[in-house]
Amino acid sequence: MDDPFIPIPEMARRAGVSASALRFYEEQGLLASMRSAGGRRQYPRSELRRVAFIRAAQAVGLSLQQISEALRSLPDGRAPTQADWTRLSRQWRPLLDAQIDALTKLRDQLDACIGCGCLSLKKCRLYNPGDGAAAFGAGPRYLLGTRSSEVRAAAAAPK
């Protein structure tokens, strides 16, 4: 029968990550290891599935905090099953849809400018002190969904 534990070099090779990544995931509470009689780090075989889960979740843009919360939701710290992935991916769908929308807007406006499209710091309303979009928050307001009509309406409103 196979050994129920995998030494860290073998775990890294099979999981497709570096040993330092495995140690980092462990420090973050995403994985658990045990020590051999000789004091070497080794992982239960089930941790391979957890690493696959972590990598898949990272690939769709989830943060380690979001991944950690998902793994903590599993009973007894077990490895995620297909049913778990289905349930969790449904919860993440609105977040992923928002990220897709933001990337689509960025792609569609990439040839213009990160903000308004004027490409001139001398004329750019986002750069100059009278910037009306600044009232809506930091960052590239138009890419984040602020409409120019909202900015104009706010600027025209009595103060």
Image: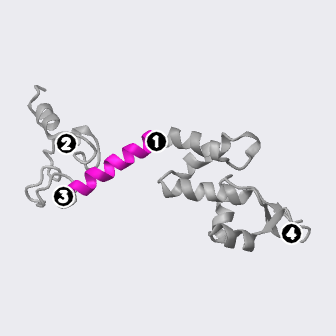
Q: Name the residue under label 2.
A: 133
Which amino acid type is shown beneath numbered disc 4?
A: Gly
Q: Does the magenta stretch include residue 25?
A: no
Which region of the structure is painted magenta?
94-109
Q: Position of residue 38 (x, y in %)?
A: 89, 71
The reply to whether callout 1 and callout 4 are in contact (CB within 8 Å) is: no
The residues tagged by marks 4 and 3 sit, at their Cα atoms, a distance apart of: 56 Å
Residue 27 visible, this orientation: no
First in sequence, mark 1 or 2: give its number: 1
Please tell me whether mark 2 sits on a helix, a strand or a loop.
Answer: helix
Relative image position of residue 39 (x, y in whole percent): 86, 69
Nearer to me, 122 or 59? 59
Q: Residue furthest right?
A: 37
Above or below — where is 96 with respect to 56? above
Using the image as rendered, state which of residue 12 and residue 25 is in the foreground.
12
From the image, state whether disc 3 or disc 1 is nearer to you: 1
Q: Which residue is drawn at 7% across and 55% down?
A: 123
First in residue order: circle 2 vs circle 3: 3
Give the mark, 3 or 1, whose residue is nearer the N terminus.
1
Query: Residue under circle 1?
Result: 93
Indicate how the structure is coloured in the image: one colour
When asked about the image quadrant of residue 49, the answer is bottom right
Callout 4: 10 Å neighbours few (<14), some, many (20+)?
few
**Which residue sits at x=65%, y=54%?**
28
